Image (cartoon, coloured by chain):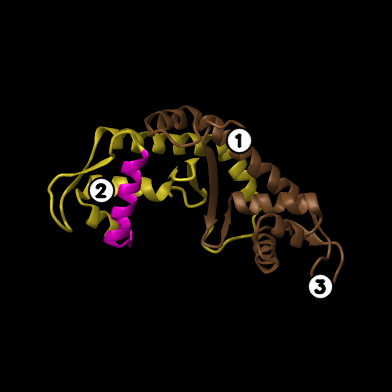
Chain colours: A brown, B yellow
Amino acid sequence: MSDRDAPEFRLRLVFGPDAMIGPGKAELLERIRATGSIAAAGREMGMSYKRAWQLVETLNGMFREPLVERTRGGAKGGGAAITATGEAVIAEYRALEAQARNAGAPHAARLRGLLRDIPGRT
Amino acid sequence: MSDRDAPEFRLRLVFGPDAMIGPGKAELLERIRATGSIAAAGREMGMSYKRAWQLVETLNGMFREPLVERTRGGAKGGGAAITATGEAVIAEYRALEAQARNAGAPHAARLRGLLRDIPGRT
């Protein structure tokens, strides 16, 4: 969070029982884009390679086109890249999150006003 | 979901490490309001009495005023009612959710357009 006093919005979109996207998948995609590696992206998130790869397979299966493609074959450490569809998914999810945060801000502020003081809040 | 084709928005607000509210807590509060009982509300959600009571204690501790009060003392099955603060929290959370859903709808629709066909979707 940029603003210490603003709550974090965690938004999950559920399209169906096996089709959902939320903060974890979005972050994984962004970290794959940044690192060029599924293993490295998973590591940064404290996730096993197996778990990261499972999430990528789930994402690739959810959409018409894969979101992540391997850029080299082989075992662990093979390169990975985000496809054009992957870029679109990241962009739409982050835009949706920003719109939701802006639209919800007055209600979030009123909820915050009802909270007991939290350690770390000014 | 009212509209079969619209995704479900699950929104969690994280104010701090021990202060968050999301769909589960909101639903529990609404079911306590409807049933007048923490045990019955938990049961409707497939939750143990202990788990439902723990969530109520967490909620009561998060806010300046309790959200739920016992209307009779004693063991399991004692009545419970939502306080004015509890009503405010439910209302703000649901309003926030509705605003977020409306604001995010165009992005959610574009994400849905990228999805592979899902069983059960028309």
SS state under label 3: loop
The three-letter amino acid code for the residue at tag 3 is Ala
SS state under label 2: helix
Mark 1 neighbour class, 10 Å CA radius: few under 14, some 14 to 19, many 20 or more: some
* Residue where numbered disc 3 is placed: A75
Q: Which subunit holds the residue at mark 3?
A: A
For discs 3 and 1, the disc positioned in front in the rendered view: 3
Q: Which residues are magenta?
A: B44-62
The three-letter amino acid code for the residue at tag 2 is Ile
Q: Is residue B98 left or right of residue A1?
A: left
Could you tell me residue B54's position as x and y percent?
Answer: 32, 53
Mark 3 to mark 1 CA distance (whole Å): 37 Å
Mark 2 neighbour class, 10 Å CA radius: few under 14, some 14 to 19, many 20 or more: many
Tell me which numbered mark, 3 or 1, is placed earlier along the sequence. Answer: 3
Q: Main secondary structure of the magenta part?
A: helix
Q: Which subunit holds the residue at mark 2?
A: B
Query: Which residue is found at the position 44% from the left and 30% from the top?
Result: A107
Q: Nearer the viewer, residue B78 or A57?
A: B78
* Residue where numbered disc 1 is placed: A98
Could you tell me residue A29's position as x and y percent?
Answer: 71, 52
SS state under label 1: helix
Q: How many marks?
A: 3
* Residue where numbered disc 2 is placed: B32
Query: Which residue is found at the position 29% from the left and 57% from the top?
Result: B42
A25 falls in the magenta region: no
Image mark for residue A49: none
Q: Is residue A19 left or right of residue B46?
A: right
Question: In the displayed structure, would residue B13 be above or below residue B44?
Answer: above
Is residue B11 at all visible to an observer of this figure?
yes
